[in-house]
Image: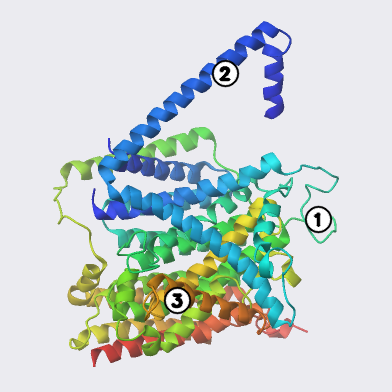
Amino acid sequence: METTLRDFAFVLAFAVLAILFALIAVLIPRFIAPRTVGLKTESIYECGMDPFGSAWIRYAALFYLYALIFIAFDVDVLYLFPVATSYVRGGNPEEFIALLVFVLLLVLAIAYAWGKGVFRWKYEGR
Amino acid sequence: MSLGEVIFVVICLVVALGALGAVLSNSLIYAVFFLLLTMGGIGGLYIYLKTPFLAMMQILIYLGAVGVLLIFAVMLAGPFWRRPKERGPFLKGVAGLGVSLLSFILFWRVLRHHPWEVGPQGEVSTSRIGRAILDRYPFAFELISLLIVASILGAIMLGVLSRQGPPKAEED
Amino acid sequence: MRRWLREQFDRYFGSDPVRLLFALGGLFFATLVVLALLYWVVGKVVTAGLEAWGWDLVRLLLGLLGVMVVVFGNALFLVWAERKVAGHMQIRIGPKEVGPYGLLQSIADSVKLLAKEIITPRFVDRPLYLLAPLLIFVPCLVAMVVIPFDARLQVRDINVGIVMILAFSSLTVLAIFMAGWGSVNKYSLIGGVRSISQSIAYEIPMLLSILPVVMMARSLSLKEVVEAQSPYWFVLVQPVAFLIYFVCAVAETNRTPFDLPEAESELVAGYHTEYSGMRFSLFFLAEYTNIFIVCALATTFFLGGYKGPVLPGVVWFFLKTYALIFVIMWFRWTFPRVRFDQLLNFSWKFLIPLAMANLLVTGGLLKL
């Protein structure tokens, strides 16, 4: 078998083992743990008060905005990984210029977000 | 069938199941997780193409980043966890059949008429990708950055517009 | 389900003793058949595996065993160390009753946790709620595959190792969100959302601080990164990257001062509020394993990994790793918790620009 497949066979084996282990760990207490059901045992915990309303509420659009910026950055940074592995020490200054332009363009994005007040946590005018 | 082939088939099944689940599940959040299952499976397929770096990128970007984005999008969607009212089963069936037929024809033609070449054997190493980026496609490399910056700017424009509260005159 | 089974059983076998006898016989026979099948399948798999894999199979099995030992030993030790360190920092003694210096305390704790009742609240989103503790453990073990404990003590040297660890650690985020969302509890959901935003905010500077290391080692394999640090450790040439990485590591593992996802005074326990007994301890275990992993990675990337004089490599590796873990515990009793907007903006406004500048400086200096 090829090395790539074998490498990831290891990964797969470990992932499967992790899930199996977690399953076993959850199943053991089924046989030895006590089981009591009271009035409020199966209710969710809200510091002792009776739960009210739904937990599934809407969240601020700000989180979405952060996630959007993140995804763009993530994609960008990942392009840098192959470049970094083949970045030659000394000589070939074009490589550095390519890197410089790439990163500076990214900085532009942060500067824009900063200027537009994405990182400000209050509504405008309040 | 060797173990590798069995796992390959299982991964294909996972991809298909995830896709089906994403379409058919009646809760948005389940649909998101099924979609992520499909994406992870596609990462597995990349490993069979001997491009482990692409596989890891697939997982990092689609599970780690796009997944988070979709999750936040669902949380923005408000308390409508169930799907909105849908068309009748007949219309849905016709639409599904039509799309399936079209894509089947497309894939069939591509598979039949494309001349398949066997690429270089062995793993595509990450540094080879990097060499290609630096030596042959530096311009495309910068364009990626530009494209992504443009998309960030667009997202921020939309987001900031929607964030702006009531005008100052109305406050206080 | 169980009641239905019982009813069916009563209906068919309950009253008639002969029938019951037949049923028992059938059950016995079925068990035999299943066992025989299992034996056959396992035998086939093992022989096929040995034929195709040879020594790699042995390596895999030993690796699984060793990694489990490391995971459990680490968790047991860290639970004890956390309390002991906390105690001494506050001029207390910490646990001392169970075993010498309280060393057996965490074993007693884990036995207790094993025997605790598992409660599933009634209105949880069952599939997500049950899946989360199973999934949270996957990235921990997978990361262990590529960590080089010594020059030859590594389960498998995958040549995209660094990216693989980063990729699989994104599963943690999903599992945490599943836990937060699935347990239909406000505290859990807020904890989950905070955790996601935090880890995505700190993932970028983390990647950016690893990039200079990759640039200098010119490889994504962890072993080659260690081997590249032969005259000097990377921390000497990349102190900024090391600091950024370490801050991000603390943030990614949700430790104080970045422990907002599980801030006790605000959110009860954050995303695992609704989990009890063994399910809770799986989260706990994953957390401590993650601390170990980020510190082991810091050791590998910046502190020369297993390299060191006199002592064997494993000892050096664990010494460095646990020194870093001690620093993280130290943080906990030194810094107050930050506010959430401060937390996110610290990353976007300070760490990311700094990491980018560091990357550019490294790139420029390498060209000189």
Q: Residue at x 24, y 77 (%)?
A: B139
- 2 vs 1, front mark: 2
Label 2 packing within 10 angstroms: few (<14), some (14-19), many (20+): few
Q: Are marks 3 and 1 on the same chain?
A: no
Amino acid at circle 2:
Leu
How far separated are the C-alphas under marks 2 and 1? 47 Å
Amino acid at circle 3:
Ala
How far separated are the C-alphas under marks 2 and 3? 55 Å
Report whether A72 appears left or right of C336: left
Residue B59's place in the image compared with B155, above or below, is: above
Residue C1 x, y percent position in the rendering: 67, 29
Nearer-the-camera pick, C193 or B56: B56
| Sequence order check, earlier mark of 2 and 3 | 2
- 3 vs 1, front mark: 3
Amino acid at circle 1:
Pro
Residue C121 x, y percent position in the rendering: 73, 48
Report whether C208 appears left or right of C88: left
The numbered dot on residue A78 is none
- Residue under pointer 2: C27
Label 3 packing within 10 angstroms: few (<14), some (14-19), many (20+): many
Residue B30 x, y percent position in the rendering: 56, 48
Q: Are marks 2 and 3 in contact (CB under 8 Å)?
A: no
- Residue under pointer 1: A51
